[in-house]
Amino acid sequence: MVYTQSEILQKEVYLFERLDSANREAMKHLKAICFLRPTKENVELLIQELRRPKYSIYFLYFSNVISKSDVKALAEADEQEVVAEVQEFYGDYIAVNPHVFSLNLLGCCQGRSWDPAQLSRTTQGLTALLLSLKKCPMIRYQLSSEAAKRLAECVKQVITKEYELFDFRRTEVPPLLLILDRSDDAITPLLNQWTYQAMVHELLGINNNRIDLSRVPGISRDLREVVLSAENDEFYANNMYLNFAEIGSNIKNLMEDFQRRKPKEQQKLESIADMKAFVENYPQFKKMSGTVSKHVTVVGELSRLVAERNLLEVSEVEQELACQNDHSSALQVPPAPEFHLEGRWLGSLTPLLLLEVNRAVFLPFSLQLVSAVLEYGGKRVRGSDLFSPKDAVAITKQFLKGLKGVENVYTQHQPLLQETLDQLIKGKLKESQYPYLGPNSLRDRPQDIIVFILGGATYEEALSVYNLNRSNPGVRLVLGGTTIHNTRR
């Protein structure tokens, strides 16, 4: 996610193996760098490896805190004294974007309560993030969620237990960890998205920066799986938060730029100087060629799916149901033809779910999914008033927004997180709804904020955090979640 294999090769690391791979050859002329999570299974695999070492020297790096008992067990197994170094390198989470991280966990709760194993894993991931960022935060949590409070307590217990690790240089305003529950806003993950990164995840799926294009009609073998990484793809980095219309225009500009450069690279090589220039420019040209092919294919497939699934029509209905009080016109729109239960696409079901979550009225169809969504994020469960704000300031904002009109009917919706963080940055987030864990509280407005959503975050929320970071100099926001949602997960 953060380091490519090519970059690792440049560090003279030539062999990549899993510790649990069977029939690995002994290569005593090589040194081994092991990077693992400090789980019982991994420690046991490492013990077996050290008893019969296949390499000359071992450098052990753990992605989180390892217990003293496990270190002792490893030392006892190292009878041949091949271990040169043992370190904790805190990276027990997935860095998705510069301001977004995920734990890649699905189904973290059983009903309204934590699955014990998932609670432990989430606590480990969050504390590893805090250690890697060198933050010892004050903690606030969503009062209406018992699961959020439980996670806050577990994180606090680790900070107290490992107080020496969290003894960082104190800042004038302490950092803040805010823990929220996805059930407070079950709407945002249900909506179709129209920015590049969010659309790709919604329609194609992003799995550790990899996109599976094997089902694209007529796809070539080398494009069946592609990587989208802002760290190594300039076009993606510059366009990931732009809307689909802008992406189409920028793809055209990318193609034209490529076409302008292409003839120069294919000119005749008549001299040594020509050959030298070609060799120097070829890697850059080849990289650009791969970038063009990848993004043209991805955007082309997004366009095909938007047309095939009538997503413009579906999204317009979704936005009206999620953002407007008058749903009369939305209810007159006939269901789009792609609605079916046998396949994976349930696009036309989303507006019906939105109406149920919004108004809690019965619609003439019987699907367990509706009951499940209402049970998870319905009005009786939510701690916030997601649809009808009672706060005078919030009502005024909604009224003025209605007077101004809507620039884009497909992007009216703003996630609840945006309003929550806006209030937090201004120092106005109510302690009655988001209390501090413990007796202390911040006197000043927070500057370093880590917000974590148990149940998962979305790329629409990632966009909100990105915009808040840009519009609030001096404030540093990081968003995390147990997973990154689309409507299929």
Image (cartoon, rainbow, N blue to C red):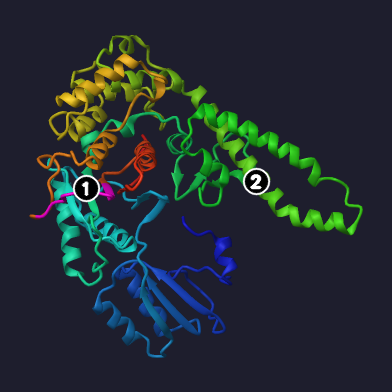
Q: Earlier in the sequence, mark 1 or mark 2?
A: 1
Left or right of residue 163, residue 79 in this image: right
Q: Amino acid at mark 2?
A: Gly
In this view, the residue in front, 120 or 132, is 132
Q: Which residue is mark 1?
A: 179
Asked whether residue 475 appears in the rendered view, the answer is yes
Q: Which percent across, then down, holds residue 396?
A: 21, 21
Residue visible at 22% across and 48% down?
A: 178
Q: Which residue reaches farthest right?
A: 270
* Secondary structure character of the magenta stretch overall: loop
| Quarter in which the C terminus is drawn | top left
CA distance for labels 1 and 2:
40 Å
- How many numbered marks have been drawn onto this rendered protein structure? 2
Q: Which percent across, then down, holds residue 167?
A: 23, 69
Asked whether residue 478 appears in the rendered view, the answer is no
Characterize the local packing of mark 2: few (<14), some (14-19) or many (20 or more) Cα atoms within 10 angstroms: some
Residue 290 disc label? 2
Characterize the local packing of mark 1: few (<14), some (14-19) or many (20 or more) Cα atoms within 10 angstroms: many
Q: Which residues are magenta?
A: 440-452
Left or right of residue 468, residue 149 in this image: left
Q: Which percent across, then down, holds residue 185?
A: 24, 34
Quarter occupied by residue 172 = bottom left
* For the residues bearing labels 1 and 2, Cβ distance under 8 angstroms: no
Please say whether residue 380 is one of the residues in the magenta stretch.
Answer: no
Disc 2 secondary structure class: helix
Residue visible at 69% across and 37% down?
A: 257
Left or right of residue 355, residue 469 in this image: right
